[in-house]
Image: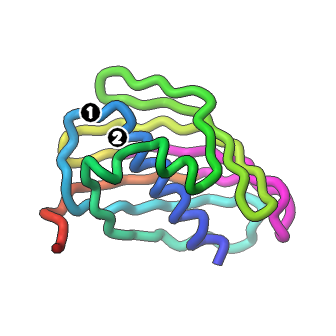
Amino acid sequence: MMNKYLVTLLLTIFANTVFAEMPDIQEGLWEVTSVANIPAMPMKMPEVTMERCFTKQNMNPENILQQNNCQINKMDIQNNQAKWSMTCEQQGMTMQGAGDIQYHKNDFSGTFDMTMSGAPEGDMSIQTQITGRYIGVCPE
């Protein structure tokens, strides 16, 4: 359950961070894969792949951040690279993290390091690698 919540949050963060300044990246259906490493957990987290439709309408970071109670503390987008730090409050948990992503018109890759406190499992750090690739037009 926590893994699915984490992946959804990360996809939202990465997608909207990549598109925050509207770089030259293809609108449409994207396949996004994330691999999380949680050192405090005895077992390895499985790779998670999801499809997400990115349009100009859902690329607005202010709308997404309000939904997830997140705040971007710092954002630096130059050339084909975005770096940011952020804080989120969700269901009694506080998450602080920093990320770095390289993007191109049809793909992106990056990392996101996060510390989560207030979870039932206790405080933990999470390192996530994420990749994305454009796969086609969005279904109607």
Quadrant where the C terminus sits is bottom left
Image vertical order of residue 27 relative to residue 21, above or below? below
43 shown above or below 59: below
Q: Secondary structure at mark 2?
A: loop
Where is residue 80 shown, x and y percent of the image? 30, 29
Instruction: Check disc 1 and give the amino acid type.
Output: Pro
Residue type at mark 2: give it.
Answer: Phe
Q: Is residue 112 magenta?
A: yes
Q: How far is disc 1 from disc 2 in space, using C-alphas? A: 6 Å
Look at 68% across and 42% down and name the residue there. 87
Residue 89 inside the magenta-drawn segment: no
Tell me the magenta residue range: 109-127
Q: Residues within 10 Å of mark 1 (few under 14, many from 20)?
A: some
Q: Quadrant of the N terminus?
A: bottom right
Badge 2: residue crowd in 10 Å (few <14, some 14–19, many ≥20): many
Above or below residue 122? Residue 58 is: above
Residue 77 is situated, as x and y percent measured from the top left of the image, at 40, 25
Residue corresponding to mark 1:
23
Q: Please, which residue is most extreme toward the left here?
A: 137
